[in-house]
């Protein structure tokens, strides 16, 4: 994350992402699969680092091996060819995007850190501070109800941050600058797409 200054001189926190180039490895037709999609590859990798089936997949397509593959659905009117490169210039400044990634893992965490519960009293001789407390009923039903929020592994989940505003697009550097934060650690892999929900402005 870095910061930029807007036209009014205010510092805005932004996230700088490398958006591409992504290579079209395969095109799925809607006639066979009942939906149209393209398979995108990102980040070059040596062929020796791949399994033989995956290396054969890239060899058949005639493209250089990629580290990451992702299938993206497309509309009926979209036309893509194997080997075509998709760069950051498919986005424009002022556009809204959704960013999906794997959030940072926080290991084993208690109720306060994992679920942000209030906890118990902090003073007056109380010994109940960060414990989970009672987790179930008495004789009926006599068990812990499913879905109860408990201590456990926190983070490292698929998260989507929606309606992020694109502030700048730098096609020559394949960079995408969005306002706000995105899930995952630095150098993590994220999936960026056009926003599926429109941001509603509240009237004053």
Image: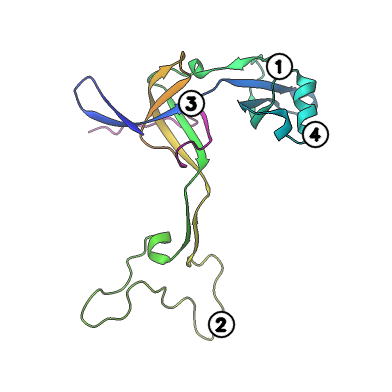
Secondary structure, mark 4, is: helix
* Foreground: disc 1 or disc 4: 4
- The residue under label 2 is 142
Question: How many numbered circles are shown?
Answer: 4
The answer to which quarter of the image holds residue 204 is: top left
125 or 198: which is nearer to us? Answer: 125
Q: Please determine whether, in this image, residue 106 is positioned above or below residue 40.
A: below
Secondary structure, mark 3, is: strand
Q: Which residues are magenta?
A: 183-204
Residue at horizontal 67 percent and vertical 19 percent from the top: 76
* Foreground: disc 4 or disc 3: 4
Report, in whole angstroms, how far the alpha carbon at label 2 lies from the one at label 4: 54 Å
- The residue under label 1 is 82
Name the colour scheme: rainbow
163 or 82: which is nearer to us? Answer: 82
Secondary structure, mark 2, is: loop
149 or 65: which is nearer to us? Answer: 65
Mark 2 surroundings: few (<14), some (14-19) or many (≥20) residues within 10 A: few
**Circle on res. 199:** none
172 or 114: which is nearer to us? Answer: 172
Secondary structure, mark 1, is: loop
């Amino acid at each position: 994350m870095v910061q930029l200054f807007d036209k009014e001189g205010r510092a805005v926190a932004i996230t700088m992402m490398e958006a591409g180039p992504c290579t079209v490895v395969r095109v799925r037709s809607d006639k066979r699969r009942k939906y149209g999609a393209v398979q995108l590859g990102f980040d070059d990798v040596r062929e020796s680092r791949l399994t033989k089936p995956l290396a054969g997949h890239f060899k058949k397509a005639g493209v250089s091996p990629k580290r990451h593959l992702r299938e993206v659905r497309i509309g009926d009117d979209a036309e893509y060819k194997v080997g075509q490169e998709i760069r950051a210039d498919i986005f424009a400044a002022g556009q809204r995007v959704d960013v999906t990634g794997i959030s940072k893992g926080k290991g084993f965490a208690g109720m306060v850190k994992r679920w942000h519960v209030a906890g118990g009293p902090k003073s007056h001789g109380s010994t109940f501070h960060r414990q989970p407390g009672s987790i179930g009923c008495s004789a009926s039903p006599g068990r812990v109800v499913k879905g109860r929020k408990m201590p456990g592994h926190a983070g490292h989940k698929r998260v989507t941050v929606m309606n992020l505003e694109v502030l700048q697009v730098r096609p020559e550097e394949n960079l995408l600058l969005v306002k706000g934060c995105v899930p995952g650690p630095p150098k993590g892999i994220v999936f960026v797409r056009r926003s599926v929900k429109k941001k509603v402005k509240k009237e004053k």
